[in-house]
Every structure is written in C-alpha cells, then in structure tokens.
Image (cartoon, rainbow, N blue to C red):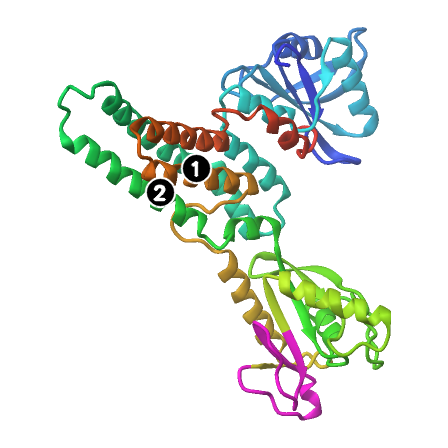
Amino acid sequence: MDADTIFAVASGAGQAAIAVMRLSGPASRAMLAALCGRLPTPRRASFRRLRDAEGAELDQGMVVWLPGPGSYTGEDAAELYLHGGRAVLMGVADALVALGARPAEPGEFTRRAFLNGRMDLTEAEAVHDLVAAETEAQRRQALRQLDGALGTLYGGWADRLRLLLAQQEALIDFPDEDLPPQVEALVVGELDALRGEVAAHLNDGRRGERLREGLVFAVTGRPNVGKSSLVNALAERDVAIVSAIAGTTRDALETRVVLGGVPVTLVDTAGLRDAENEIEAEGVRRARARAAAADLVISVSEAGTPAEDGNVLVANKIDLGGAVPAGAIGVSALTGEGLDTLRARLAEAARSLTESAGPPPLTQARHRAALLEAAARLAGAQTAELSELRAEDLRLALRALGRITGNVGVEDILNTLFARFCIGK
C-alpha cells in the first residue's frame, strides 16, 4: 500500500470558498513539482499556479510541502489549498491521476500514520472520534486520547508486565541459582497491584463509552400526563404529536439534545397502562423495554397525583394548580415554568454519568474486551500452580494489552476500523 501515492479532498463536500486536497506517498515530491513548477520551502505556505501536464492552468492557490517523516502520515506529503469549485477539484484530481496518484480510501491517511509509527491505534481511534465529536465534552475526551493518555496508560501496564514476565522466566530458567526470595515476592505483589489497577479501570461505569456514543434518557409515565409535550419543550421543537386523547404515542420516538455538554437521546414512550388493543399493548411493551435499557428514566406524573418510579421525578401541569410530590420537580410544559430547573438537573445527571477523574476512561468496546481478557489472564497467573503456567498467562495478558495499542495481532481489525473514517482522513 505504501508504494502508492494517494490524494483526497480533506475538506467538506460541496461548493466552498477554499478546499484542501492532501497528497501522501513516495511520489509526492515529483507530483507537487510537476503541478507547481518548483517545490516551495518545506512547511511554509507558498502561493503557486497549478498546471497540468499540457501546461493548462488549473488554479491559483497556496501549497505546502511536507517532507517525511515529519508529516501526518510519516511519508512525503503535500497539501493544496484550492478554490472550492467542483471544476477546480476535478481538474487537479485528473492531473494527479495522470501523474500516477490514486484516490485515497476512507481513513487511508490515518492508517498510514499508524503503520508508519506516527500514532498508536488508540490515537488513531481518537482522530475518528474528534472528527465525529458533537459536543464540547466529546471533543475534550477525544483530544485527551489523541494526546496519548490511553496509550501511555496501557503502555505503562505493558512495560510492567514485561518486567514481571522477565522475573518469572528467571525463576523458571534458574531454579538452582538460589535467587533471592524477594524475587518471588516482588512478582506476586506486582501481579496483585496490576490486576487491581486493570479492574479499577474496567469498573468505570462505562463513562467514556457513554460519552462517546451518547446517553439515552427515557421519558415514561401514564397516558396523558404530558410526556410528549415535555419532550417537545426540552428539544425546543415539535418532535412528538401532542393530543388530549390518551394513548396518542404508540411507539418510542427519539430526539437528540445536548445536556451538560453530553449528547443525549430523549425517548418519548407510550403511556404505561393496561392497553386497550394489541397496538397499544406493543407500545407499552416497548416503553418498558426502553426504560429498562436507558441510562436514566425521567418519570412524569401530573401535579396533584403520586409520583411514579424513576431516576428523575417530574410533576407536569403545575399551571393547573396541583401539588408537587416530594422529591419531584414541578414543571409546566405549556408555560415553560420549571423547565430551567429540570434542564439543570438533567445536565447534572448527564455529567455525572460521563465525567471521569484520574486516568482516562475506556472509550471503545474493543478496549474493554481486550482488558477483560487481560484481567482474566492476570487472575489465572495469580492462581497458577506451576511457574510455567503463570508465565504463559502473563504472556497472554501482555498480548491482550498489545492489541489495544496495535502492537500485536491487529490486522483483522484494521480494515473495519479505518473504513469508518471519512475520505481524506
């Protein structure tokens, strides 16, 4: 793959004032020189007229020459800042193809950066998360991972495992050398400490994954208490049909909002009651299922009636004069009274479910799977009756950690991972 020189438009699709085209690969230097007539000073934006092989002018713009290995991909690379019209981009693309370049596949620039040692796999995943970030909290988490926080944590554990393995191998290879008893004690103590750290990292309430994927808040309650009106008010748009007829909502309706810097999907569910027909019964069944799977349940009742079970209790229709039950937040979806208090409470809950102090949180399901395997191998090492079996468990734990950062055994996931990227990244 690295023998090819690739190119792609890295800016957004559609007409724009400026478009950025990236070029990477061994022929980048020759191709840039062919387009511009002469190479600019490395890493300095220079104005150039771009021409095709016949000398026809394609555009006037800024170009940057980025000789490897000090580029994003680690290869010779270049960036072209062009006028954003389709004809300009097509003309430059045709000229690059004529020079021997090919269009990049999704994620191919970042994949080359990983393969060339410019970043580990956790940092590559952070690039994707940063591009996809919808909120400030997601951006902060992705940047922290891109800075190498996760890779540093897992790399530190791997270094300690290597030392443990070396000490264990010494106990196996030199049983008659009267090694100090402290060696065995050090192995046992460090193994216990490492297992505890991995277990604590796994026991994070899935905060990083929740923030990356977004939370789900289910809005539940009996029919006609104003659940749909409340969802519309929180979303500040008409998501659900509002009617005085009980049982109007038959299926779960979803809308995306941001609460406390966290993306949250609000799910408006069917009213919980003894259904009058098969369709409503299915809606109630789905409502109960969504509530059971949700990160938080907003239970809505009507002011003046007892509160229902839920994580956040809401008494709606306070404009009608009903009393607010103890522990509930009184609101009126009609007038807006109390909605700011409810939004603040939901934002606090969203932050509580996703914020993480100390080490960086887990952000990917594959990280969790590999760490669960590593934890199981460490547990096996602690209970192994033979030194050779303990050493084998330590090796397997080390391999599981290596799969997270991409040091070992990741060929089977690379295609899946980078296929999610946009072209040009």
Whether residue 240 can be seen here: no
On the image, the x and y values in percent for residue 307 come to 61, 83
Which residue is more in the foreground, 93 or 400? 400
Q: Quadrant of the C terminus?
A: top right
On the image, the x and y values in percent for residue 371 come to 46, 40
Looking at the picture, which amino acid does disc 1 mark?
Ala
Image disc number at residue 195: 2
On the image, the x and y values in percent for residue 406 come to 50, 27
Q: Secondary structure at mark 1?
A: helix
Residue at screen point 46% across, 32% down: 400
The quarter of the picture where residue 10 lies is top right
Which residue is more in the foreground, 72 or 413? 413
Q: Which residues are magenta?
A: 299-327
Q: Quadrant of the N terminus?
A: top right
Compute the Cα span from label 2 to label 1: 9 Å
Specify which label sits upstream in the sequence, 2 or 1. 2
Q: Is 362 left, or right, of 228 in this rendering?
A: left
Which residue is outermost to the front?
385
Q: Is residue 309 magenta?
A: yes
Residue at screen point 56% across, 57% down: 261
On the image, the x and y values in percent for residue 135 come to 59, 52
Whether residue 285 can be seen here: yes
Circle 2 residues within 10 Å: few <14, some 14–19, many ≥20? some
Circle 1 residues within 10 Å: few <14, some 14–19, many ≥20? many
Q: Is residue 110 magenta?
A: no
Image disc number at residue 55: none
Residue at screen point 68% across, 70% down: 219
The residue identified by callout 1 is: 374
Residue at screen point 74% across, 8% down: 99
Q: Is residue 264 above or below residue 126?
A: below
Q: Is residue 256 above or below residue 16?
A: below
